[in-house]
Amino acid sequence: MPGCDDEKLWKELNLQARALYKEGRYSEAANVAEQALDVAERAFGPDHSNVATSLNNLAVLYHSQGKYVQAEPHAKRALVIREKAFGPEHPSVGSCLNNLAEVYREQARYAEAEPLYKRALAIRKKNLVPLHPNLATSLNNLAALYHSEGDYSQAEFCCKTAIEILEEGVGPEHPDVAQSLSNLASIYFSQSKYAEAERLHERALAIKERVLGPEHPSVASSLNNLAALYHAQGDYARAEPLTCRALAILERALGPGHPHLAVVLENMAKLYRNIGEQREARVMEQRAMSIPSAKF
């Protein structure tokens, strides 16, 4: 039987990991979450629901660092434990399905991701109130999947529905609203609807800077999105400082080997080539190539 001290320590480690995650300090958060998993397995046994919680937390943190190979087995094991403990229709099972699908989508394994996303959404519709943020999360993730597959109509519908749920459920200044706005802007960008995309990206960036702070990785994502938009329109003077700021934030927050960093480096290389700075472009390309692909 686990002692009170073990459970207290496990809960404290979870709180610490969650706080670090919210600050964008993913590597530190993962280290703490790994300690929590060790405590959970020792104190509660390998098939306890608390172990599933720790596994799920670690899967999310590995995913946030682009460590998809490490994330996948943790997400799968958490799913098995929760299905056995709570049954296949429990909301916590929906969370595991969603997280595993995210790992697959990041690796372009869309055929594996889609049924998991849809099953997670069905579970959440059955168990949650209509304005619950987790419903919006499922819709956003489906939107990202459809976007990746070029199904812009389906992607836009899912994303707009998610925004409506979040704005009414958690308020218009919530970071989840900002992320949904970014997602919708990216869908418009893919269709060359630049004016609509710019408006949404700017609103998302403003929310993130106010709520998360100027050094959060999510702010870097919005900066990079805006820079890509300006770049596509040939406005290199506006694109360059945004890309540089995004790169600096990600280097500080995620370290030099994160796949998201490679994306920004590639964008910067293209930008430098377009403005005739060939040497700087080669430096950025070499740095990007030194980072392992997110698909492996």
Image: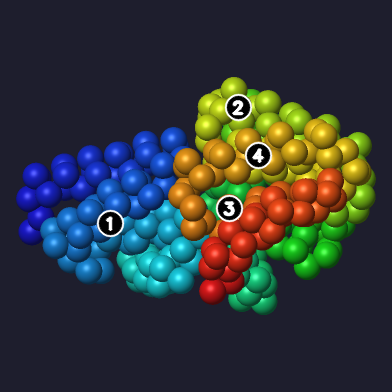
Image quarter of residue 234:
top right
* Spatial separation of the CA atoms under disc 4 and disc 2: 17 Å
Q: Nearer the viewer, mark 4 or mark 3?
A: 4
4 displayed left or right of 127: left
- Seen from the viewer's position, the closer of residues 193 and 249 is 249
Name the spot of residue 137 as percent of width and height, x first: 61, 49
42 displayed left or right of 192: left
Instruction: Give the residue pinned by disc 3.
Output: 261
- Seen from the viewer's position, the closer of residues 110 and 66 is 66
Instruction: Give the residue pinned by disc 4.
Output: 244
- Seen from the viewer's position, the closer of residues 176 and 192 is 192
Name the spot of residue 196 as percent of width and height, x first: 88, 38
Instruction: Give the residue pinned by disc 1.
Output: 34
Mark 4 vs 2: CB contact within 8 A: no
Q: Is residue 51 above or below residue 176?
A: below
Query: Which residue is at the far top?
Result: 210
Instruction: Give the residue pinned by disc 2.
Output: 209
The first of marks 4 and 3 along the sequence is 4
Q: Amino acid at mark 4?
A: Cys
Task: Tell me the SS state at disc 1.
Answer: helix
Q: Nearer the viewer, mark 4 or mark 2?
A: 4
Q: Amino acid at mark 1?
A: Glu
Task: Tell me the SS state at disc 3.
Answer: helix
